[in-house]
Image (cartoon, rainbow, N blue to C red):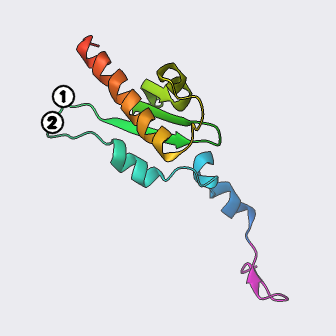
Amino acid sequence: SSGINAEYGMSIKKASYFSRFQTKKLRRRQGKTNYTLRRKLIQPNYKNHSSVKYRLVVRSTNSKVICQLTQAYLDGDRVIVDAQSTELKQFGVQVGFTNFSAHYLTGLLIGKKISSLKSSGV
């Protein structure tokens, strides 16, 4: 009755343990999100209430590079501007959308989009 299995020398968890057990969030279990670091990353600066925190997210896939300017909200992140390396076709780049220069040019492209967005007053 003490919860220890004498035969194997290990404890046996009873139903009361499992009724209080709380599973971790799905993205934590998958190892995709560290919520402690995420909370620190998106926590607003309380000394400057009018400031908005943006993040530049870069994703490298097997076929392209994706850059996104995101802003955190309680119901989820929202993408403000995005750029993909496949858009470089408009500027004369036909191949090599995942190499080092494609990363650099995609960063320049999203910077150009952000500056045009700021100049339009949005």
Please check the rendered image and state whether residue 7 is part of the magenta-colored stretch, yes or no.
yes
Which amino acid, by three-letter code, is at mark 1? Ser
Q: Quadrant of the N terminus?
A: bottom right
- Residue 73 visible, this angle: no
Q: Give residue 21's position: percent from left, percent from top.
A: 63, 57
Q: Could you tell me if the residues under marks 2 and 1 are in contact, i.e. CB atoms within 8 Å?
A: yes
The chief SS type of the magenta part is loop
Q: Position of residue 5 (x, y in %)?
A: 80, 83
Picture quadrant where residue 112 is located: top left
Q: Amino acid at mark 2?
A: Asn
Provide the residue span drawn in magenta. 1-12
> What number is the disc on residue 48?
2
- Where 87 sits versus 104, above or below? above
Q: Position of residue 116 (x, y in %)?
A: 30, 17
Residue closest to the eye, 14 or 106: 106
* Point 29% across, 35% down: residue: 53
- Which residue is rendered at x = 48% and y = 31% of the image? 76
Q: Which residue is found at the position 39% from the left and 28% from the top? A: 110
The part of the image, by quadrant, that contains residue 117 is top left
- Residue 92 on image: x %, y %: 50, 24
- Comparing 3 with 23, the one in front is 23
Q: Which residue is mark 1?
A: 50
Q: CA distance from mark 2 to mark 1?
A: 6 Å
Q: Is residue 22 left or right of residue 36?
A: right
Disc marking residue 94: none
Asked if residue 99 lies left or right of residue 48, the reply is right
In terms of secondary structure, where does tag 1 sit?
A: loop
Could you say whether the residue bearing mark 2 is in a helix, strand or loop? loop
